[in-house]
């Protein structure tokens, strides 16, 4: 992978993982709904807010 990245003008590594089972760890249905994005309305700004909410919930655990 490294030789291919050296050739790229803007190399990056993207990690892709399954969401299976992870959303159930969220404490509120509202947070789960935000991350599931069923209606397709998730924006970068909304994702940032959802991440902040998730951290707050996780710290409260």
Image (tube, rainbow, N blue to C red):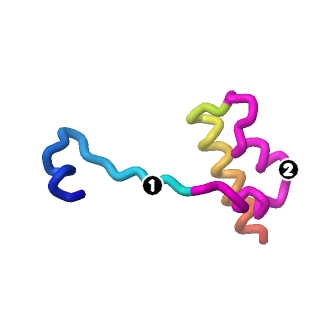
Q: Residue at x 65, y 36 (%)?
A: 46
Find residue 29 and name its label.
2
Specify few, some or many for label 1: CA neighbours under 10 Å numbering under 14, 14-19, or 20 or more.
few
Image coords of residue 42 (percent x, y): 65, 33
Farthest residue to the bottom: give it. Answer: 61
User: Toward the viewer: 29 or 58?
Assistant: 29
Q: Residue at x 31, y 48 (%)?
A: 12
Quadrant the C terminus occupies: bottom right
Magenta stretch: residue 20 in it?
yes
- 38 in relation to 25, above or below: above
User: Toward the viewer: 34 or 20?
Assistant: 20
Image coords of residue 6 (percent x, y): 15, 50
- Which stretch is magenta? 18-41
Location of mark 1 (residue): 15
- 1 in relation to 31, above or below: below
Q: Quick one: SS at disc 1?
A: loop
Image coords of residue 28 (percent x, y): 84, 54
Q: Residue at x 65, y 55 (%)?
A: 19
């Amino acid at each position: 992978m490294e030789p291919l990245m050296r050739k790229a003008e803007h190399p990056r590594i993207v990690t892709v993982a399954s969401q299976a089972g992870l959303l159930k760890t969220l404490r509120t249905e509202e947070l789960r709904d935000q991350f599931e994005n069923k209606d397709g309305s998730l924006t970068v700004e909304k994702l940032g807010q959802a991440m902040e909410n998730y951290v707050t919930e996780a710290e409260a655990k």
